[in-house]
Amino acid sequence: AVRPSIVVRSQSSEGPDYSAKAQEYWEETSKKIQDTWESTADAEKPAVIAIFLVVSIAQIGIGAVMDKIDKLPIFGDFFELIGVAVVGAYAYRYVTDPSERAATKESYNELVKKVTGK
């Protein structure tokens, strides 16, 4: 007996070309970085490299310390509890006070205007 089968084919739909956008963004960013690097004085370039390396090493070190602290049974839960308490305190403050809500909404709208340029 022959069983019927269903064949599903995918067809590309007209949508945004994300790879082209990513390529354009990458080219724009790399051009900006290259221009900034070329405009940096030769005497400052070693300092820029050193700062970049120190920040990278510090990030790795901070990540390692945070992983070790998170593995300790007491501290991980304690820090999580502190985080929940802080978020709860800020949420309560901004939700219950109308002037805080208005100020938060205003700063959010300003941020949206800066990001979108509208």
Image (cartoon, rainbow, N blue to C red):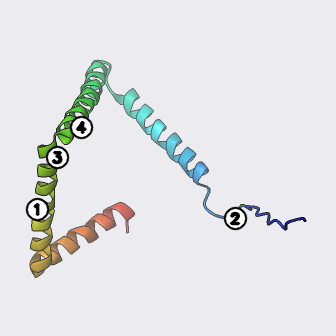
Considering only vertical position in the picture, is 55 above or below 74? above
Q: Residue at x 11, y 73 (%)?
A: 92
Report, in whole angstroms, how far the alpha carbon at label 1 lies from the one at label 4. Answer: 22 Å
> Can you identify the residue that label 4 sits on?
67
Q: Residue at x 51, y 42 (%)?
A: 26
Tell me where residue 97 appears, x and y as whole percent: 9, 79
C-beta proximity under 8 Å, tags 1 and 2: no
Q: Residue at x 13, y 67 (%)?
A: 88
Tell me where residue 56 appears, x and y as whole percent: 29, 29
Q: Secondary structure at mark 2?
A: loop
Which label is found at residue 85? 1
C-beta proximity under 8 Å, tags 3 and 4: no
Among the two numbered marks 4 and 2 on one chain, the one whose residue lies closer to the N terminus: 2
Mark 4 or 2: the one toward you: 4
The amino acid sitting under disc 4 is Asp
Which label is found at residue 76? 3
> Can you identify the residue that label 2 sits on?
13
Q: Nearer the viewer, residue 45 or 77?
A: 77
Report, in whole angstroms, how far the alpha carbon at label 1 lies from the one at label 3. Answer: 14 Å
Q: Nearer the viewer, residue 67 or 86?
A: 67
